[in-house]
Image (tube, helix red, strand yellow):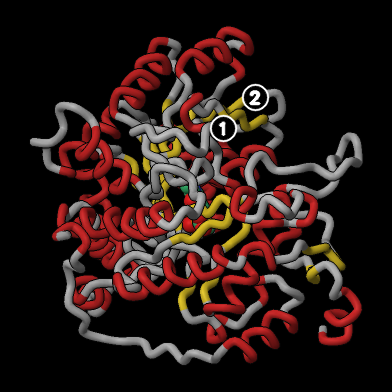
Amino acid sequence: MEKYVEPFKIKVVEPIKVIGPEARQKAIARSGYNLFKLHAEEIYIDLLTDSGTSAMSDNQWAGIMMGDESYAGGRNYFHFEETVHDIFGFQNVIPCHQGRVAENLLFQTIAAPGLVIPNNSHFDTTRANVEMNGAEAVDLLCAEGQDPHLVASFKGNMDVDALEKLIADVGVDKIPAVMMTITNNSGGGQPVSMANIRAVGEICHRHGLPLIFDAARFAENAWFIHQREPGYRDKSILEIVQEMFSYGDGCTMSAKKDGLVNMGGFLALRDDALSERIRNLLILVEGFPTYGGLAGRDLEAMARGFREVLEPDYLRFRVGQVEMLGEQLVEAGVSILEPPGGHAIYLNAGEFLPHIPPQEFPGQSLAVNLYVESGIRGVEIGTFMFGGADPKTGENRTARLELVRLAIPRRVYTNMHMNFVAQSIIALHEKRDTLRGMKILKQPPFLRHFSATLSFLGEEAASRTQA
Ligand code: F0G
């Protein structure tokens, strides 16, 4: 019970106006049944993402007032640099405004056609930045991570045998870096064990390859190691984090997650020469190396966020709140990716709505119905997001799993909000047979989930006139 109690008091509130099911039905019809097109004010509980949606602490807001907005050499940069250096251990700290910029700077510099970047699972923006520079992004997720029902401690691990094999097959010259995403967002927010990080680090260094972490949810990963991996119970979270990064050569960071800020990120590297090249590029696209596309006050809020996110009380509640939502759903017979990861619950829409085939988008139907019934916004991660025509064959592709991600913002919603989310999903589950499939009316050539319009099957004409 204790682990679920909020370790904060609320000092500032943001009222939510609840608009009711009829108004939501109108709003989603106007949005072409695409949840990205809603106005945020039409949503009661927004679980679209845990990125940039955190509530900052009084200490971070106080830091905002201490912003030094000098163009070069502002004091907040030095506090930020010292904090990142202490926690992550890399001496070159390059600020930027969000994680994908760190990826862009890195891969513009090290990726090229013919090269291969292995990762446990690339996040979408990481993959896109690798591919945009002509390299191949290869996912090497362990076998446990592929089974949605298997309850295992570290389903985010990399398959180390597959990594060895890839290195032997393509050769070290073709691999500019190995990446590890901790926690593994695309794999369901599942953690990576210290043993796996150590093993991957050992392989990389034996072959002279740099290991770069995607550290977006590094503190949540460390908490899972603290809780689940033998030998780490008596270590502090800071010690665990320091050990994790000691096996690598750098990291990209979206501080919009475990930096507890609304905007910010960085790239940190051991390699001085590579860092110098990237800093020159940074000046071109983000700004001078002591602000990198951010205000001085943002750097201060990040520096303070990186300390707060290591607090055991914070992490116990954070991971506990996600777990509690998962437990309520599993108890009621709702199928989710198990066990719950660090930042989100993934509803298994394929099993929730077995009567809706993948090409009729069960995940999108579930997400839209959840919004209309209860005002909750999640996001489909399935055939609507990843389907579309195969560029080679022209055939419509089907995703491996049909999921709806409910990502929990940090320190934003109370447990009562989460109970409401659980009850709403359970109520929908009870009438799941009445939910219908969907079809796409209009879609762009790429990344269709952001802007396509849809309708429920059997309602095409009605939704066209409403839209
Ligand atoms: N890496 C991971 C593992 C991420 O989850 C994200 C963002 C990024 C990199 C990119 O960072 O948004 O700051 O540019 N994930 C968000 C999400 C968008 O909803 O999962 P960014």
Side (left or right) of 432 relative to 415: right
State whether residue 211 is above or below residue 121. Answer: above
Q: Which residue is mark 2?
A: 115
Q: Residues within 10 Å of mark 2 (few under 14, many from 20)?
A: many
Residues under numbered marks 1 and 2 in contact, where contact means CB atoms less than 8 Å apart: yes
Q: Residue at x 69, y 53 (%)?
A: 385
For disc 1, the marked residue is 110
**Left of 137 or right of it: where is 150?**
left
In the image shown, does 68 or 426 lie closer to the viewer? 426
Badge 2 marks a residue whose secondary structure is loop
Position of residue 332 in the picture relative to residue 362 (left or right): left
Q: Is residue 76 left or right of residue 100?
A: left
Secondary structure of residue under mark 1: helix
- Which mark is first along the chain, 2 or 1? 1
Residue at 29% across / 70% down in the picture? 415
Quadrant where the image shows the C terminus: bottom right
Q: Position of residue 297 (x, y in %)?
A: 31, 72
Is the CB–ligand 1 distance for label 2 below 8 Å?
no
Label drawn at residue 14: none
Percent coordinates x, y for residue 435 in the rendering: 69, 66
Q: Is residue 467 above or below residue 435?
A: below
Measured in 3D between alpha carbons, the distance from the residue under mark 1 to the one under mark 2, in whole angstroms, is: 9 Å
